[in-house]
Amino acid sequence: NKSRSCRIDSIAQSFSVLSGFGSPERSHEAVLAAYDMLYDEKNETVSLFTPPFSGAWRETGYIENYLPGVRENGGQYTHAAIWLAMALLRIDEADKGWNILRAVLPASHPQKRYMAEPYVLAADIYTNPQHQGRGGWSWYTGSSGWFLRAVIEELFGVRREGGVFIAEPRFPKEWKGSGVRLSILGEDVLNKYAKR
């Protein structure tokens, strides 16, 4: 690869796990590499890929219309960050998965920098040093839907197989436990308390 840009991409790494088509060993390695290279613990952001496109050696299309580290050009694309969290949880890297889930929440960012509504997930968060931590495209319901699925299905491990609900939580070490209560039409069908 002669390009200096996009050396690692969150979506490709995550979907090696989420699709089930990657070899378990290589997929595990790929997702951990994505976490190490794309998660910025200090700024609580998860880049879509790194490095961003900037004067690429061939035409990259509309993506270079954005500054490096803004939106799809190496900024945090929240859908992809959540998919990375889901992949980490599936490979039993609960602490890392939880770090990502927590990082996408508006409360993880100083409002002065975030500059978006503090009560909705933003579709993207800038990683460009001049605009670090600024939220964009708020009220983007796709991100919140994926976040909900990640928490219910991967973190709490609640899923339905046929007519049976199963709970196999993957909690971070810092959690002492948590509870799940599922009701359908007012009838309690699952009340499971999980302890570490």
Image: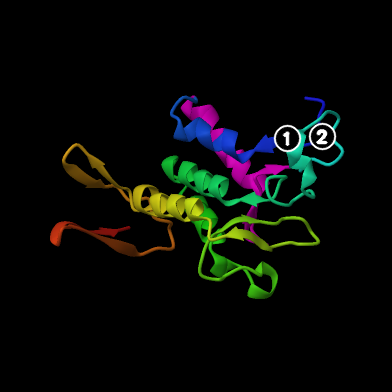
The CA distance from mark 1 to mark 2 is 7 Å
| Magenta segment boundaries in residue numbering | 23-51
Residue extending farthest to the bottom is: 112
* Image x and y of residue 160, in percent: 24, 42
Q: Which label was assigned to residue 7?
A: 1
| Quarter of the view holding residue 45 | bottom right
* Element at label 1: loop
Taking depth in this image into account, of 194 and 103 the one nearest to the observer is 103
Decide whether residue 140 is among the magenta residues: no
Q: Position of residue 65 (x, y in %)?
A: 79, 44
Which residue is rendered at x = 39% and y = 50% of the image?
149
**Front-most of residues 19 and 142:** 142
Question: Can see residue 30?
Answer: no
Q: Nearer the viewer, residue 149 or 65?
A: 65
User: Amino acid under label 2?
Assistant: Arg
Queried whether the magenta region covers residue 24, the answer comes back as yes
Residue count near mark 1 (Cα–Cα under 10 Å), binned few <14, some 14–19, many ≥20:
few
Which residue is located at x 74 percent, y 41 percent? 63
Q: Secondary structure at mark 2?
A: loop
Residue 144 visible? The answer is yes
Q: Quadrant of residue 55?
A: top right
Q: Is residue 94 above or below residue 113?
A: above
The residue shown at (74%, 51%) is: 69
Q: Amino acid at mark 1?
A: Arg
Q: Residues within 10 Å of mark 2 (few under 14, many from 20)?
A: some
Q: Which mark is residue 4?
A: 2
